């Protein structure tokens, strides 16, 4: 049977897409392949000795308009306020300076620079360190591009956060319940997609085979890039990077010491967030700190180290908790790499390869990376690009024939076609790490040459900046 659509991944972006599609046209035949035993992806509430914790997504703000709208539509209102106040206060002077910084760098030209470098040049040493601590996500701070970060932060005022005491999974569960009985939606759990052959023939680890007119990749780029047969997507996948996260919770019945604010610490605890009377997110970390705690647990030192650092932070002795649970995610959240204009990259991700009916949706390429709201917003935009039958109908860029490409075959006017896309690489030639060998490819379809040389992810990123359109009739 040939499906209309195969969806790879069953996180909130896929669920939201299906939920809306059902309203437009419930007759499309869709198969959903999810590698895990259940739906929800990075929304994952777990039960421990009668308590519920969120391993992935935990909180949201009322600024998350798409999520808040969805909650209203689904009549989900059992959320509560989460401690949002931070222990770190920015002085009025630093607030003003930050505000100016955000205004200045919310400009596309700052998409080419890392946040950390620009911030280092605009703030003095102490201000820089304070801001980094105040932000709380070291890996993102170091890696993300300046423009998108500044645009996303918007302003520095404290937001009230909310959470679901019974777990964020209520959102994915409610949507799933509304679509699972559609006879045209075929859900397959525990089916990891391993390979995509020509004409959208999809193979799973369990040796199942499916085929469809369209494939929607509703999964993080890190996983997509591991699927055989999607090499053509590499340039687009390389435009975002990912961070790790480790949420470590502990339960302390009858405790008296939980802080009244979110504690931002310079130790490897990084952030401490009280959840309710008994449960605390005792450490929330990214990057090396996240890995440090995994290693401490593996070496049998988790509680000893944690106790020492927490006691130093709060200034009082603490008893052993009823339980401690680490939740390490890799990839956890995404950011746009330097040199990519987020708005354009998101558009491109809806059809990343000119001659394939492939589409990417989800948080990774969204305008609100790191949040459920981003995953929903991105899926919503994708739905808007579908035709009246709900089928993806996306024409991204200008089209050029190989004949037109061939006219630009000089060092000073150089176009090249790779993976069905056309690039004007005139400005790249002088800085190409491989030197003038690149001149052999100009004015031609150089896909084979490009692949044979074995270019790195970095090369893909550079190339992406020079894209001008698609190759016609490829
Ligand atoms: C630790 C952590 C904390 C977070 N905190 C918050 C928060 O507080 N608030 C908030 O709003 N957001 C938070 N987020 C982000 C939020 O969880 C995500 O933005 C959102 O859930 C992403 O949804 P998605 O559908 O884009 O992707 P995902 O949820 O990642 O769904 C992708 C699915 O694809 C599946 N998949 C991958 N590869 C394959 C394959 N080859 N074959 C089949 N299936 C495959 C995966 O198993 C997964 O189920 C957090 C995330 C993490 C990890």
Image: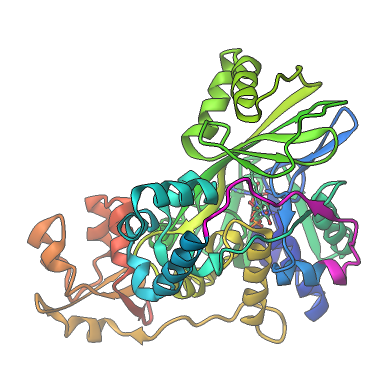
Q: Is residue 308 above or below residue 123?
A: above
Q: Position of residue 308 (x, y in %)?
A: 60, 19
Nearer the observer, 329 or 223: 329
Q: Residue at point 70% right, 44% down?
A: 261
In this image, 203 relative to 469: left or right?
Answer: right
Q: Position of residue 437 (x, y in %)?
A: 10, 60
Q: Is residue 399 above or below residue 226?
A: below
Q: Is residue 471 visible?
A: yes
Among all residues in the image, which is located at the extreme front? 92
Q: Residue at point 80% right, 56% down?
A: 172
Name the dominant secondary structure of the magenta segment: loop
Q: Is residue 329 visible?
A: no
In this image, 345 relative to 319: left or right?
Answer: left
Q: Residue at point 72% right, 72% down?
A: 65
Nearer the observer, 291 or 376: 291
Q: Position of residue 467 (x, y in %)?
A: 32, 74
Nearer the observer, 195 or 124: 124
Is 134 magenta? The answer is no
Res 159 quadrant in image: bottom right
Res 26 quadrant in image: bottom right
Q: Is residue 37 above or below residue 67?
A: above
* Quadrant assignment for the C terminus: bottom left
Q: Position of residue 61 (x, y in %)?
A: 72, 62
Give the magenta part as a residue range: 71-91
Is 74 magenta? The answer is yes
Q: Residue at point 41% right, 52% down?
A: 127
Q: How is the image coloured?
A: rainbow
């Amino acid at each position: 049977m040939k499906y209309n659509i195969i969806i790879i991944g069953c996180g909130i972006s896929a669920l939201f897409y299906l939920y809306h599609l059902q309203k437009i046209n419930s007759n499309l035949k869709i198969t959903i392949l999810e590698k895990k035993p259940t739906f929800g992806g990075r929304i994952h509430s777990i039960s421990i000795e009668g308590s519920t914790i969120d391993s992935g997504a935990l909180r949201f703000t009322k600024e998350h308009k798409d999520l808040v709208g969805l909650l209203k539509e689904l009549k989900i209102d059992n959320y509560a306020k989460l401690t949002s106040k931070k222990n770190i206060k920015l002085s009025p002077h630093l607030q003003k300076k930050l505000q100016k910084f955000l205004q200045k760098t919310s400009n596309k030209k700052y998409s080419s620079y890392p946040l950390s470098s620009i911030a280092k040049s605009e703030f003095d040493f102490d201000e820089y360190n304070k801001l980094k601590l105040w932000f709380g996500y070291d890996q993102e701070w170091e890696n993300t591009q300046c423009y998108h970060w500044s645009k996303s932060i918007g302003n520095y005022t404290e937001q009230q956060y909310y959470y679901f005491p019974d777990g964020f999974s209520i959102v994915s569960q409610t949507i799933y319940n509304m679509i699972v009985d559609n006879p045209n939606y075929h859900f397959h759990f525990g089916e990891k997609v391993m390979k995509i052959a020509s004409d959208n023939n999809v193979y799973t680890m369990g040796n199942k085979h499916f085929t469809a007119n369209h494939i929607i990749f509703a999964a993080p780029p890190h996983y997509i890039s591991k699927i055989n047969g999607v090499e053509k997507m590499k340039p687009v996948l390389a435009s975002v990077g990912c961070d790790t996260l480790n949420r470590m919770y502990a339960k302390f019945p009858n405790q008296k010491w939980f802080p009244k604010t979110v504690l931002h610490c310079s130790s490897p605890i990084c952030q401490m967030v009280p959840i309710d009377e008994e449960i605390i997110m005792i450490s929330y970390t990214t990057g090396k700190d996240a890995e440090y705690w995994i290693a401490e647990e593996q070496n049998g030192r988790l509680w000893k180290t944690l106790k020492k650092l927490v006691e130093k932070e709060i200034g009082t002795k603490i008893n052993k908790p009823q339980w401690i649970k680490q939740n390490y995610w890799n990839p956890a959240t995404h950011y746009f790499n330097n040199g990519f204009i987020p708005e354009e990259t998101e558009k491109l991700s809806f059809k990343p390869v000119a001659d394939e009916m492939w589409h990417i949706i989800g948080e990774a390429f969204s305008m609100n990376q790191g949040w459920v709201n981003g995953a929903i917003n991105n899926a919503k935009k994708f739905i808007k690009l579908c035709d009246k039958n709900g089928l993806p109908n996306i024409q991204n860029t200008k089209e050029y024939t190989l004949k037109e490409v061939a006219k630009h075959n000089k060092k000073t006017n150089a176009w090249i076609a790779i993976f069905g896309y056309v690039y004007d690489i005139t400005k790249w030639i002088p800085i190409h790490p491989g030197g003038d060998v690149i001149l052999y490819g100009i004015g031609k379809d150089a896909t084979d040459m490009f692949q044979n040389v074995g270019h790195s992810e970095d090369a893909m990123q550079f190339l992406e900046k020079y894209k001008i359109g698609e190759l016609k009739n490829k």
